[in-house]
Amino acid sequence: MQKKGQFITLEGVDGVGKSTVVPSIEQVLQAQEISYFITREPGGTPLAEGIRKLLLSDWKEPVTAEAELFLIFAARAQHVAEVIKPRIEAGTWVICERFTDASFAYQGGARELSLGFVEKLANAVHAEYWPDLTIYLDIDVEIALQRRSHRVQDRIEKETIDFFEVARETYLKLAETQPRITKIDASVPLPDLNRAVGKVVERFVAQHT
């Protein structure tokens, strides 16, 4: 029987450096000759990328928290069915920038929706495909916002600092209660951050190969 692949996710508030540390994960997996696939959320398939554009665009009408959450899970359902599930079942490791923990933090925490409701949607969409390892990059929100201040802001990135503070607080609470989540200080210099992420992945690989 084909051994399933592992599912690794990267989480953190906008500007924390999720994309930046992906190469350090790839380096570890390549050294161990592990087949892997990099993807992101919202997105990952043509349909899900289309939904991403809807989510992040500015609209003349306010986008309700519920509409935002349902759109995200619509994209996630397609992503899991078309990308994540088949690859994991085929033995490929999947590395995804953001997953359902982002929904807990942003729509559950910052948008003040019920975390229980978010969890129900998650179990309906990916009950068998929760992450095996989540690397949560933690940083002071003001620093994160400064890091991304040079780029064009999408609808969610334009939210207030208080919004992102609540999202961070929710992430921190999740990290305290979920053993699969490893918190890493993302305020350190990039070489140190890459080494820290690499070590976490090395330990995880040693336990699962």
Image: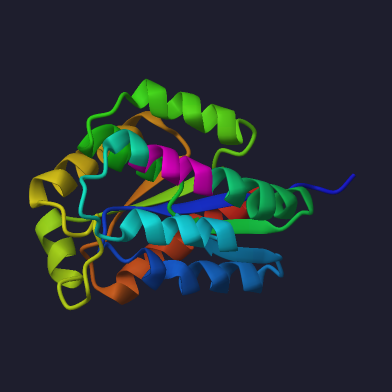
Magenta-highlighted stretch: main secondary structure?
helix
Q: Please tell me in which quadrant of the rendered image residue 101 appears.
A: top left
Q: Is residue 183 magenta?
A: no
Q: Nearer the viewer, residue 157 or 131?
A: 157
- Residue at x 46% of width, y 55% of height: 51
> Count of labels shown?
0
The percent position of residue 180, horizontal first and vertical second, equals 48, 39
The percent position of residue 67, horizontal first and vertical second, equals 35, 38
Q: Please tell me in which quadrant of the rendered image residue 46 appears.
A: bottom right
Q: Is residue 71 magenta?
A: yes
Q: Residue furthest front?
A: 60
The percent position of residue 58, horizontal first and vertical second, equals 24, 59
Colour style of the rendered protein structure? rainbow
Relative vertical location of residue 20 with respect to residue 57 in this rendering, above or below:
below
Residue 199 seen in render: yes
Relative vertical location of residue 185 with respect to residue 162 in this rendering, above or below:
below
Q: Nearer the viewer, residue 203 or 60?
A: 60
Residue 209 seen in render: no
Q: Is residue 96 left or right of residue 186?
A: right
Q: Is residue 163 left or right of residue 191?
A: left
Q: Which residues are magenta?
A: 68-75
